[in-house]
Image (spheres, rainbow, N blue to C red):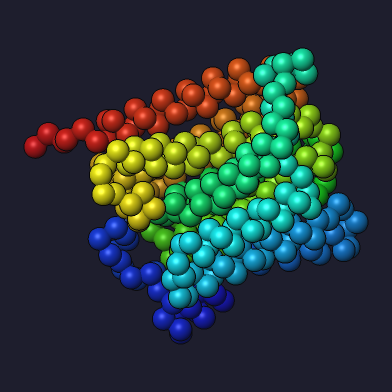
Amino acid sequence: MFLKWSRKRDLLDIPNERSSHTVPVPRGAGLVIAIVCLAGYGLAGVFLNVPFLLMFLVAGAVIALTGWADDLYSIPRILRVSVQGICGLLLIYSIGYFDAVSFGTREMTLSFWVFGIAVTFCWFVWVVNAFNFMDGIDGIAAGTGLAASIVWLIFGYIFNAPGIMIYAGLCGGACLGFLFFNWQPAKAFMGDVGSSFLGFSFAALPLMALSQSEADRENILLFAAATVWPFIFDTLFTFFRRIPALGINVWKPHRSHIYQIMVDSGMSHSKVALIYAASCLITGLTVLGFMIVQKPLIFVSVTIMGSLSMVLITFYLRCKRPHST
């Protein structure tokens, strides 16, 4: 229905020098993902008597509408980030924030005190934008969203968090359905409305887990990072790699992310999307497994996420190497 509507209104993504597609494709179809997740979560709270957070619903709707406005009118980035920051602060005020991280045992726990608010705020804004930065090839954002949703679904089941389990199921189902239209060659793009909403979902789910799950609070931040670590690492690696280049605006659109370089070297969109989705499953499920058996989490997290980071850097270096004639 959305594709038919968008074509009538000429809501198309026209290829340019940074594009990975060559023909106009309907954009903004991620609005469907946001509608499914928000409507389903609201209905579950009303009719299934599961824990329900109104601010989660409101913040998700605001971020989705901001992304939709950007798809239609290309609003300034500073305005988008400001709206995201306000939503993050409202969630922190109404739900809570990361106040500690464990280094193995309760006796080896680092307390953030009030600095936890700043840590949580930076986490929220970065993850929301990370999905926006990474939604540049067919299937990568929806595939990663599906993988992360599976991990959060299991988390909700294991740690008795029905609200998280239902939302993760909705989000994963929406991403799976979207992949039928977004897998290479894509028939629809999710646009900023979809990518920023998925970023919101995986930035806000750990905040929900602080109050609605039986998991140890000090382990949730590391677990949340593990579920989307390939996106976090790719964006951080690219951001800091571009800083030394004089005159470069690190926020300006470009084609220097690891996944973009992999595609430019000849790898297919589907292969790169599968690599990122599988990486999310590996890191997320591994860290979740150690949470379940209550083993020291910090060492596992650093090892598994560090190893994956080295794999992505290896892909980057090999794909950057000039091809022989």
| The image quarter in which residue 12 lies | bottom left
Q: Position of residue 233 (x, y in %)?
A: 47, 36
Most extreme residue toward the front is: 114
Q: Position of residue 28 (x, y in %)?
A: 50, 68
**Residue at x 83%, y 34% (from the top left corner):** 214
Give the position of the N terminus as an image quadrant.
Answer: bottom right
Give the position of the C terminus as an image quadrant.
Answer: top left
Q: Where is residue 139 in the image (x, y as percent from the top left)?
A: 46, 52
**Residue at x 75%, y 25% (from the top left corner):** 292
Q: Is 89 on the left-hand or right-hand side of 25?
A: right
Q: Between residues 285 and 304, which one lies in front from this camera angle?
A: 304
| The image quarter in which residue 245 lies | top left
Residue 246 visible to an observer of this rendering: yes
Q: Where is residue 85 in the image (x, y as percent from the top left)?
A: 60, 55
**Residue at x 28%, y 30% (from the top left corner):** 317
For residue 117, above or below residue 74: above
**Residue at x 67%, y 36% (from the top left corner):** 115
Residue 168 visible to an observer of this rendering: no
